[in-house]
Every structure is written in structure tokens, then in C-alpha cells.
Image (cartoon, helix red, strand yellow):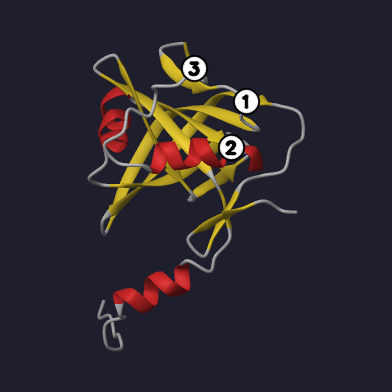
Amino acid sequence: MTRHTLAPVDATAYRAAVSQHAAGVAIVTSTADGRPVGMTVSSFASHSIAPPTVSCDLATSSRSLAAIRDHRRFVVHLLDERQEAVAVRFATPDLDRFDAPDWRWERGLPVLDGTMARFEAELITDVEVGDHAVVLGAVVDVEVAAVARPLIHQDRRFHGLG
């Protein structure tokens, strides 16, 4: 199949356009060599109700992706608007993201406290596309907290719905 394209898209313009998409903020956690790993993402999706399946996109260079590929299990936590500091902590490189009292081990995975919802999943597959991988997981456990207002990321900033 021949693919016809226009001139390459300017990376700066592409980033500026994509940053206008408002998305909920999540943290993905797993474990590597018995240590917790995790990162902030804004690319979470539910793919199927039956069977329950979720996805997220992770940088191919991330420790979190390597841990998920190795451990085959992960947790996606949906953040509420009061958890901006948590989102920033898990987005900051070279920081001990688990140097805080707001998490615990559960079934061998790091679980964050106080999130709106969480999905524990087993890796189905991941597909590399450019510098990221789409990670698909079969949900094996879910927890929903009281209804809260989600943390949103748009235009390179965090927002609440209010």
C-alpha cells in the first residue's frame, strides 16, 4: 500500500495543537525489582466493558513502561482536582515519587491513596508508535471513591472543572 502525505508536520506546531486537548490526569504505577515506579499520564482510555479493558500511553524510554513489560501488571489511578501536587510529583524526572505517605503496597503493586478511581490491570499487549507505546490491560480489580471533580490537563497546565 502506498501512503501519500503532505510535507512533514512541524513538531512545535503539533505540540501546540495537541496541548489544546483537555484530558483527565492519571498516574500509572507498577513495580521494578521490588521497587515502586510510576508516572503521570493524560492518555488514559477505557476500551471495553466486556471484558473490562483500559489503555494508556507511556514513553518508550520510561522506567514505568519497562516495569509493566517485565511485571505484566499495573495500576491506573484517576486524580481529582485536589491532587495537582501528586500529578506534578509523578511528572518530575529524577525525583523519588514514592517519598510520601500517600501510597501503600496492595497485591504486590503500589497503590495511591485518595484517588477518584483506580484500575488494577494485567498487561495484554503494548504497541510502540513513535516515541510512545500504547499499553492495553485487562482490568482485574477496580475501586471507585466518592464522586469527585477530576483534575484536567490542558494547554500545559492543570485545571479543575470549576
Picture residue at 26% right of the left edge, 59% below the top = 130
User: Mark 1 or mark 3, which is nearer the start of the sequence?
Assistant: 3
Q: Which residue is mark 1?
A: 114
Q: Tell me if mark 1 has few (under 14), some (14-19) or many (20+) residues whose alpha carbon lies within 10 angstroms of its own.
A: some
Q: Which residue is mark 3?
A: 101
Q: Find the distance from the CA under tag 3 to the CA under tag 1.
A: 11 Å
Tell me residue 85's x, y (percent).
Answer: 52, 38
On screen, residue 87 versus residue 108, left or right, reads right
Front label number (2 vs 1):
2
Tell me the amino acid under the disc marked 3.
Pro
Tell me residue 96's x, y (percent).
Answer: 32, 27
User: Mark 3 or mark 2, which is nearer the start of the sequence?
Assistant: 2
Picture residue at 54% right of the left edge, 65% below the top = 21
Residue 133 seen in this snapshot: yes
Picture residue at 45% right of the left edge, 21% below the top = 100
Tell me residue 150's x, y (percent).
Answer: 66, 44
Q: Which residue is mark 2?
A: 83
**Depth check: 122 or 83 in front?**
83
